[in-house]
Image (tube, rainbow, N blue to C red):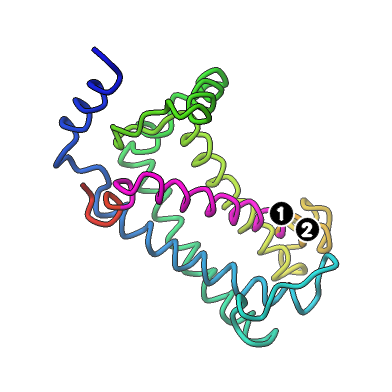
Amino acid sequence: MSSISIEKAQNASTKGKVIQPAWVRVLHWINAVAMVIMIMSGWQIYNASPLFDFVFPRSITLGGWLGGGIMWHLAGMWLLVINGLLYVLLGLVTGRFRRKLLPISASGVIGDTRAALTGKLSHADLSTYNQVQRLLYIGIILVGIVIVLSGLAIWKPVQFQYLAAIFGGYDTARYVHFAMMASIVGFLVIHVALALIVPKSLRAMIIGR
């Protein structure tokens, strides 16, 4: 059977199948809103005391000034943390993480990366993540944990002095926080690009099928 025939068969078998359950879709879109708030307000806070020789354009920041940026950032933080905890808890309890993200291997990641770069990576069965997707999703979960912890160290460096010390102090925690933000932005760019390349994946995240 040719690869085209196999892909058509896989498409037929998954047609009408629930790919993304309701709880995943709801938490996904809440997380998307929270991340936009966090990133744009974070850029506003960054502009008040830049780490590097550049600032973000005012048009892509949120809050209007330092105090406003902080208020938006804290509001987004609680939304992100509560939503993230629910996602991780349900992912573990339902076994979704185990089914979707495991197993993963270096050879599998290399093989799927090579297939993607040569246009041979199949997207017929959206219910199964390829090895590159698994690596990215595991990585972004870890990045999310680090960005929250480094954010707490920056927010309350006295109350969370031991946490700040783990990051090497307040100043170093800011650099770690910025690096994690950059990683999330990079992930979002790839995530949105793939959704546009494979539009049925976006449809599945909206209607589930």
Q: Magenta segment, principal secondary structure?
A: helix
- Is 63 in front, or is 158? 63
Mark 1 secondary-structure assignment? helix
| Residue 33 to residue 75: above or below | above
Residue 21: x %, y % from top left: 25, 48
Mark 1 sits on what residue?
179
Q: Do residues under tags 1 and 2 come within 8 Å of each other at their CB atoms?
A: yes
Quarter assignment of residue 65: bottom right
Mark 2 secondary-structure assignment? helix
Q: Residue at x 52, y 34 (%)?
A: 135
* Mark 1 to mark 2 CA distance (whole Å): 6 Å
Residue 76: x %, y % from top left: 52, 72
| Residue 37 to residue 163: above or below | below
Q: Residue at x 62, y 77 (%)?
A: 61
Q: How many marks?
A: 2
Q: Residue at x 60, y 51 (%)?
A: 186
Mark 2 sits on what residue?
175
Indicate the amino acid at tag 1.
Answer: Ala
Where's the N terminus, which quadrant?
Answer: top left
| Residue 156 to residue 13: above or below | below
Q: Identify the mark at residue 8; answer none if there is no mark.
A: none
Indicate the amino acid at tag 2.
Answer: Tyr
Residue 161: x %, y % from top left: 77, 62
- Is 181 in front, or is 87? 181
Residue 101: x %, y % from top left: 43, 33
The span shown in magenta is 178-202
